[in-house]
Amino acid sequence: MSLIQTENLTKIYGHGETAVTALDHVNLNVGAGEFVAVMGPSGCGKSTLLHLLGGLDKPTEGRVVIAGQSLADLSDDALAAIRRRQIGFVFQSYNLIPVLNALENAALPLILDGTPAPAARAKAKEWLSKVGLADRLGNRPDQLSGGQQQRVAIARALVAEPSLVLADEPTGNLDWRASDEIAALLRQVADAWGRSVVMVTHDPRIAAYADRIIFLRDGRIVEETHLGAQGTISSDWVNGRLQANS
Amino acid sequence: MSVRHALLGLLAQRPRHGYELRAALEAMVGGEENWDVKPAQVYTTLERLADASLVTLEAIEKEAGPEKRVYAITPAGQAVLREWLADGVERGHQRDEFFIKLMLCLISGEADPYQVIQAQRAQLYRELHATMAQRSALDPKRELAKILLLSKAEMHLEAELRWLDITEARLDEVRRQPLPEPPARPRGRPRKALNRA
């Protein structure tokens, strides 16, 4: 059973002669707990796909179905609720609030969604511990390394217990080792915590952590490569790395 | 890379017989899937090294089973080993099966070059994933050498994947250029067929 389905998903920007087809009838299924990487040259439609999956943009044609719910059928309020509760976002530049510490940043989505502060903080603490930052709760972003900031962002993405995590170039600003650590953590998000992960990346090594790679070109899926059975990368190893680098 | 230098290095550590040498070599490279050296190759190499006085037959052990000929390195062997260790390793020739495949695909038109590139890309990604999976099962406290060897393999795969991207992006340019042909034969006897015509 797929958690996400896209049916003929199409996005055209502009009209008439200047119209640009960013996404062209894309049919994609992502299973629960599956880790999918999306690759392709710049301008191939990677980011458009991610935005449509996340309900941040509306398709010109076709639709996105998440957990049986078509995003097109939802009111703006209902769509916003899905974005807050079903989908976690991870960005290249972390997008943490500079004046808040790790705990406050991670708790923010719950606070904004009306969860009482003590419960939100407890939940944020739980997820920060899971990503190996139990001893960094009080640190502000500028007191954390890039890899640690991205881990706070992943904790923030998971704090509302979403079923889907969307990551846009999550290792784009990180060095070799921290990139490895973040890719391993996203592996964990899928394997150990059962969330579906869709990650846009241009880094081959990071993409190779996924279960499947989708190659986009000119808005179309030109190839899908299955990399191995799910869970072939040892979660003990992933855990070990997170503890070692915390 | 030669078995010869590998055996000299292992014998510099301590005298051993052929079977032990092969097992030690295999363990060092992380299994025969990484470098499969046949027993016969070990024994013939040992004989040649002995002929060149780089190793010497130290003892013949006769216990249960076949006799074991234990070899030791000689000072001349140590000199050859040190010289080899001190030299840089050449990265090797540019023989590349995939490159040949791509060129033949362009020449013959028997396959879509983009699909040939994609098939290779899928292959490399599967290898990269499998290598990382293999590495993730190792214990860095006991198997660091093997982890480093696998990391090197990953970096090579990564480089090949990047090269594929570059090649794919420039494939149309390559197609517009005349593909390499052998230089015209300057002299020599004309072909018979041409003679008759």
Image (cartoon, rainbow, N blue to C red):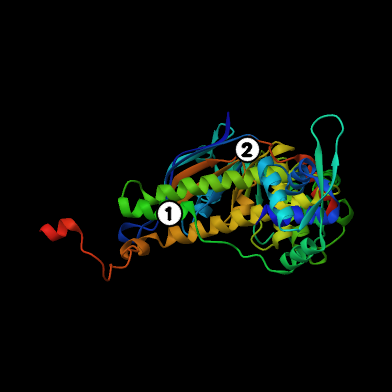
**Foreground residue, A87 or A131?**
A131
Q: How far across and how far down the image is residue A17, in percent?
A: 30, 60
Mark 2 burial class by Cα count in 10 Å: few <14, some 14-19, many 20+:
many
Provide the residue designation for mark 1: B100
- Relative to B129, is A16 above or below? below
- Could you tell whether A46 is left or right of B71 in the image? left
**Foreground residue, B86 or A242?**
B86
- Relative to B41, is A40 above or below? below
Q: Quadrant of residue A36?
A: top right
Q: Give the spatial CA distance, label 1 vs label 2.
A: 36 Å
Q: How far across and how far down the image is residue B128, in percent?
A: 62, 48
- Relative to A107, is A72 above or below? above
What's the residue at 51%, 51% (across, down)? A57
Q: How far across and how far down the image is residue A141, in percent?
A: 78, 63
Mark 1 burial class by Cα count in 10 Å: few <14, some 14-19, many 20+:
few
Q: How far across and how far down the image is residue B147, in percent?
A: 75, 50
Q: Chain letter for mark 2, please.
A: A
Kindly state the secondary structure of the residue where label 1 is placed.
Answer: helix
- Could you tell whether A129 is left or right of B191 in the image? right
Provide the residue designation for mark 2: A34
Q: Amino acid at mark 1?
A: Ile
What's the residue at 71%, 54% (across, down)? B51
Kindly state the secondary structure of the residue where label 2 is placed.
Answer: loop
Mark 1 in CB contact with mark 2 (< 8 angstroms) = no
* Residue B118 appears in the rendering: yes
- Could you tell whether A168 is left or right of B106 in the image? right
Taking the view exactly as shown, the residue that stands out farthest to the bottom is: B186
